[in-house]
Amino acid sequence: MDTLSPAERSERMRRIRSKNTKPEMRVRRLVHSLGYRYRLHDRRIPGSPDLVFRRRRRAIFVHGCYWHGHNCKLGRMPKSRLSFWQEKISENRRRDERVRHEIEALGWTALVLWECELRNVESLRSSIKEFLNA
């Protein structure tokens, strides 16, 4: 049973963005502070990665744990309309896997950063440096 009215639920869902989210902005600031320059949401690359490093042939996706079904406390299933959300998140995961294969087929390498991983800045910093300098 949903605790919000249909109008309230619609308003809440309408506010959810796919670009320029807080987790994405946090990663962008960190990458920029490390001295790397990038392009945003390049539609020529499968999945329109959040950050694109064309010369390095690298792409970074910043995934929200809820929307992409991560196995952490942020990725929990909602309590209402369970069958709808299971299918929705399952389809998101299938799309993520398909995009990863498409990027690799083009000779690119992708890094997926999960929303819950962004809290440990030092670990995140070393992961990004290692990924971009490989």
Image: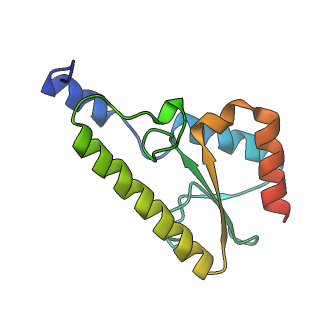
Residue positioned most to the top: 3
Residue drawn at point x = 42 percent, y = 62 percent: 94
In this picture, is 43 found above or below 33? below
Q: Is residue 103 left or right of residue 56?
A: left
Tell me residue 98's x, y (percent): 47, 69
Q: Is residue 48 left or right of residue 1?
A: right
User: Closer to the camera, 87 or 109?
Assistant: 87
Quadrant housing residue 124: top right
Q: Quadrant of the C terminus?
A: bottom right
Q: Quadrant of the N terminus?
A: top left
Tell me residue 114's x, y (percent): 60, 43
Residue drawn at point x = 63 percent, y = 48 percent: 113
Is residue 30 visible to the viewer in this orientation of the structure?
yes
Residue drawn at point x = 54 percent, y = 65 percent: 42
User: Closer to the camera, 11 or 83?
Assistant: 83
Is residue 43 visible to the viewer in this orientation of the structure?
no
In this picture, is 27 found above or below 102? above
User: Closer to the camera, 27 or 81?
Assistant: 81
Residue drawn at point x = 22 percent, y = 27 percent: 9
Tell me residue 80's x, y (percent): 24, 30
